[in-house]
Amino acid sequence: MCKHFNFFCLVFSLLIM
């Protein structure tokens, strides 16, 4: 889902999981 590695993106994906 994250095109580029971003801290916010990583946190967001963890929240989804």
Image (cartoon, rainbow, N blue to C red):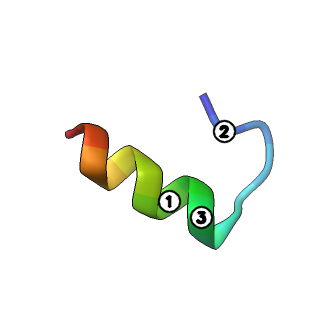
In the displayed orientation, state which residue is furthest to the bottom. 7
| For residue 6, above or below residue 4 | below
Could you tell me which secondary element the residue under label 2 belongs to?
A: loop
Q: Amino acid at mark 3?
A: Phe
User: Residue 1 shows which numbered tag?
Assistant: none
Check disc 1: other Cα within 10 Å, few if <14, some if 14-19, many if 20+: few
Pointers 1 and 2 in contact (C-beta within 8 Å): yes
Q: Position of residue 16 (x, y in %)?
A: 28, 38
> Which residue position holds label 2?
2
Residue 3 relative to residue 7: left or right: right
Residue 4 relative to residue 12: left or right: right
Which image quarter is the N terminus in?
top right
> Which residue position holds label 3?
8
Of pointers 2 and 3, the one earlier in the residue sequence: 2
**Real-space Cα separation, disc 2 to disc 3, in angstroms:** 10 Å
> Which residue position holds label 1?
10
| For residue 9, above or below residue 13 | below
